[in-house]
Image (cartoon, grey):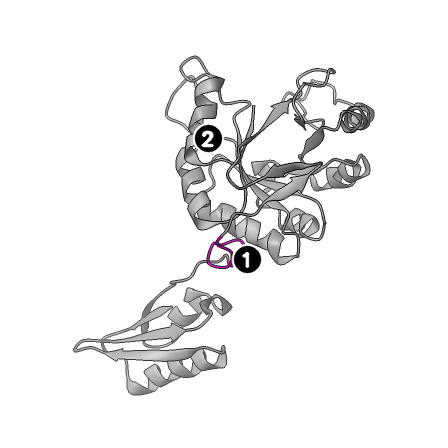
Amino acid sequence: MIIVMQRQATAAQINNVITFIRQRGLHEHISHGEERTIIGAVGDERVFEPRELEALAGVEKALRILQDWRIISRETQQQDTIITVRGQQFGGQQCQLVATMTSSQLPESINIFIDPFYQSASPYTPPLQNNINMQQQIKQAHQANQSVWLRIRDVRQLEPALQAEADIIYLGGELMPNRTLLNEVGCLNIPVVLCKDKHHQVDDWLIAAEHIALKGNHHLMLGEAGTLSLERNAPYRLDVEAIVKARQITHLPIVANISHLAHAYMNSATLMQLAQAAGAHIVIY
């Protein structure tokens, strides 16, 4: 971390910053310029926030060098993580496809995606009772040696999903800020897809993933299902830039969910090509 002192900072204020750095287990590198002093905090700077230093007398600003993710970064692990589920490998060089289940009949794909807890936004639409169907679908899929990717939309749906023996838990972007849920899935020994929402930045995405990994669950994948678009008739688009950036920063497998992104000018085939070109390891279609 780089700490820039104010022009009028006194020697006592500089020493106070140095003491603060040392108390956190780091050591300092001091550069005395003609107008101001710059202090480098050498070590794991994640032990404090920039605002803690900026609150000290004489400090003008503090700039972080390292990011808020460590376990999932390529600094920690250069090679891609590969997660194996029912004999299928997710991650690495090969792109795997996952078919969305849209009817009671199982698709022919070896990997299927189900969303049994979906509810209409209309308050007049009766709630769906899909728990029994969900269990039957998962049982049938397992008999056919298919892996089941199951989306949950609330922390209370996690236990039924586990009891139904889903192979992979998919967290929609609306759940990413739910720290309670992140802590819960972080304590599990089951693959989890953490999806970002349409308004999330890549940094928000990776920090949330780090929360899960920090709890011990390293069977983790990152999901991208669309970001805001300027197209009036297609409000969401595939966030290709986010996939490319995440692929460079983290070793985790990247999932592109294009199942709801196709429109008149961008069909599923083109979206799949874009996802694969960006570096997605898995495509849900």
At numbered mark 2, what does the secondary structure look like: helix, strand or loop?
Answer: helix
* Residue 67 point in image, percent of width and height: 44, 58
Q: How many numbered callouts?
A: 2
Region in magenta = 70-78
Q: Amino acid at mark 2?
A: Gln
Q: Quadrant of residue 176?
A: top right
Q: Amino acid at mark 1?
A: Ile
Is residue 72 on the magenta stretch? yes
Spot the residue most to the left: 34
| Residue 226, placed above or below residue 204 | above
Give the crowd class for mark 2: few <14, some 14-19, many >=20 residues within 10 Å. some
Residue located beneath label 1 in the image: 71
Is residue 280 or residue 227 the one in the foreground? 280
Residue 27 % position (x, y): 41, 80
Distance CA(mark 1)–CA(mark 2)? 25 Å
- The numbered mark, 1 or 2, whose residue comes first in the sequence reads 1
Rendered position, 188 above or below 59? above
Q: Residue shown at 48%/49% (left/top)?
A: 250
Which residue: 80% across, 34% down?
A: 164
Question: On the picture, is 135 further left or further right than 65?
Answer: right
Label placed on residue 282 = none
Q: Provide residue 228's location: percent of width, then percent of height.
A: 43, 30
The answer to whether residue 217 shows anywhere in this view is yes
Chief secondary structure of the magenta portion = loop
Residue highlighted by disc 2: 276
Quadrant of the snapshot with the C terminus: top right
Disc number lying in front (1 or 2):
2
Residue 157 relative to residue 228: left or right: right
Q: Place residue 135 in its image quadrant.
A: top right
